[in-house]
Amino acid sequence: MREILFRGKSLNNGEWVEGLPMVPSTNWDICAIVARDEECGPLQFSEINPSTLCQFTGLLDKDGAKIWEGDRVRIYGDEGCLETEHDEGVVEYCGAGDYPAFELKPSFDCDSNCLSYGMAMGGILRIGSIHDQEPPCTT
């Protein structure tokens, strides 16, 4: 079964929290993540910044980290980083029209979904998020 999961940055401490989104009524100015700990304890409500709400793609990077909407990723080939002008991108959900899928932006000519292409080429590495203050050093 697919894992349906979201995350957002807590208004309390700025840390990422994972769970399911909850929006009271139709007010998108208020948003929370609802999560239950591993032991099926009580529900935890964490108010988040709605602009940081992102969905888990269901994919893991080459190091086993979850890949989220809004993540910066680097594409690797069998011999290492592709080192082209298209070796990095941001994961976005493309829900408009007839193409509901996660994709890399900017996209490049690879005759397929660029995120899927990156996974098939040797994997992708999560290098940060558009919601982080500064991307980590990737030397």
Image (cartoon, rainbow, N blue to C red):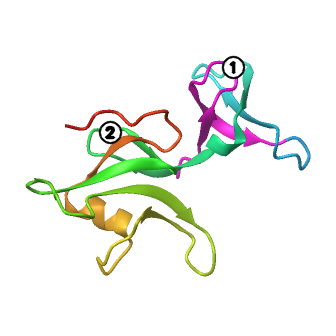
The structure residue drawn at horizontal position 58% and vertical position 49%, both measured from the top left corner, is 55
Tell me if residue 111 comes above or below residue 3 in the rendering: below
Tell me if residue 124 comes above or below residue 45 in the rendering: below
Q: Nearer the viewer, residue 108 or 16?
A: 108
Which of the labelled discs sits on residue 64, or is there none? Answer: 2
**Earlier-in-chain disc, 2 versus 1:** 1
Task: Identify the amino acid type marked 2.
Answer: Gly
Q: Is residue 10 magenta?
A: yes
Q: Which residue is mark 1?
A: 12
Q: Nearer the viewer, residue 65 or 31?
A: 31
Q: Residue furthest right?
A: 25
Q: Is residue 127 magenta?
A: no
Q: How many marks?
A: 2
Q: Relative to residue 96, is residue 128 drawn left or right?
A: left
Q: Which residues are magenta?
A: 1-23
Mark 1 crowdedness (10 Å alpha carbons): few <14, some 14-19, many ≥20: few
The quarter of the picture where residue 121 lies is: bottom left
Inter-mark Cα distance, 2 to 1: 28 Å
The structure residue drawn at horizontal position 60% and vertical position 19%, both measured from the top left corner, is 39
Task: Identify the amino acid type marked 1.
Answer: Asn
Quarter that holds the C terminus = top left
